Image (tube, rainbow, N blue to C red):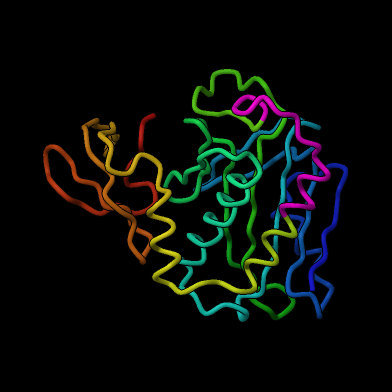
């Protein structure tokens, strides 16, 4: 069982979702808005969104329903969102580690997953900002939207309901840890390609080899060879 709620405007769907966790029998509670004013991204970054053009969506899922480590739950969620957009557009969609979604070289989705205890239950709070109809991004050269990357106009309400249904149906039946990891790596952005990375304010070339089950990214660097990185220890420049 799942529920999906709508707010005309809010600061952050991740911050607002606890007020909707009143349905004890629901496995998933979703919340969305088309006007999020103070969205948050990974590591405290701001996620800005044009009103009426994009979707801010949060899904609360009880931790007790899953037997996956947090890192693999994150991978699986990113993989599902990737699959949804690939099915929707008919185009190759990739995941920029750890969980940005890339379409034709541009970031169209940012994901923030938090773990919170609310009303005596532990929840995964899955927040995702989808650039859908926005066509300009000021000085953010790496950002795009479904509109800019496909030329198609998607109706926001229908898009969100399709997304919610896809996620809740698939999250109920996760595959094995091995399959999750294999799928994540199979769709890893710029894997096995020469790329430029920024590490401790120094740039050097390297090749992304794989992400591991602990949430780390392994990169073969031109100067130091194969190394693992976690969180904000490395930045891919693209």
Give the tally of numbered discs: 0
Locate residue 91, reporting x and y percent.
55, 38
52 sits to left or right of 173: right
Locate residue 60, reporting x and y percent.
70, 65
Residue at the image position 79 percent from the left and 69 percent from the top = 2
Q: Which residues are magenta?
A: 147-163
**In magenta stretch: residue 62:** no
Q: Height in image: 151 above or below 44?
A: above
Tell me which corner region of the image, top left, top right, bottom left or bottom right, holds residue 118. bottom right
Nearest the viewer among 17 and 209 is: 209
Nearest the viewer among 158 and 130 is: 158
47 sits to left or right of 182: right
Secondary structure that dominates the magenta span: helix
- Locate the C terminus and report the quarter of the image it occupies: top left
Residue at the image position 13 percent from the left and 46 percent from the top = 225
Q: Height in image: 195 above or below 230?
A: above
**In magenta stretch: residue 162:** yes
- Locate the N terminus and report the quarter of the image it occupies: bottom right
Nearest the viewer among 147 and 4 is: 147
Nearest the viewer among 130 and 103 is: 103
184 sits to left or right of 224: right
Locate residue 219, reporting x and y percent.
24, 47
Tell me which corner region of the image, top left, top right, bottom left or bottom right, holds residue 52. top right
Locate residue 78, reporting x and y percent.
53, 54
18 sits to left or right of 64: right
Residue at the image position 55 percent from the left and 72 percent from the top = 174
């Amino acid at each position: 069982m799942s529920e999906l709620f709508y707010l005309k405007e809010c600061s952050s769907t991740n911050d607002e979702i606890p007020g909707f966790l009143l349905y004890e029998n629901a496995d998933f509670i979703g919340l969305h808005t088309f006007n999020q004013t103070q969205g948050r991204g990974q590591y405290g970054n701001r996620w800005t969104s044009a009103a009426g053009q994009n979707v801010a969506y949060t899904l609360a899922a009880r931790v007790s329903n899953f037997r996956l480590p947090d890192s693999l739950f994150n991978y699986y969620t990113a993989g599902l969102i990737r699959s949804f957009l690939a099915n929707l557009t008919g185009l190759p969609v990739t995941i920029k580690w750890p969980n940005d979604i890339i379409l034709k070289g541009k970031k169209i989705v940012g994901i923030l997953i938090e773990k919170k205890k609310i009303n005596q239950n532990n929840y995964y709070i899955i927040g995702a900002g989808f650039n859908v109809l926005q066509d300009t991004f000021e000085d953010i050269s790496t950002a795009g939207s479904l509109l800019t990357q496909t030329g198609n106009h998607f109706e926001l309400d229908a898009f969100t309901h399709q997304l919610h249904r896809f996620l809740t149906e698939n999250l109920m039946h996760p595959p094995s840890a091995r399959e999750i990891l294999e799928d994540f790596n199979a769709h890893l952005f710029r894997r096995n390609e020469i790329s430029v990375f920024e590490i401790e304010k120094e740039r050097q070339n390297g090749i992304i080899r794989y992400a591991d089950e602990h949430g780390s990214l392994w990169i073969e660097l031109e100067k130091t060879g194969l190394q693992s990185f976690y969180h904000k220890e490395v930045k891919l420049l693209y």
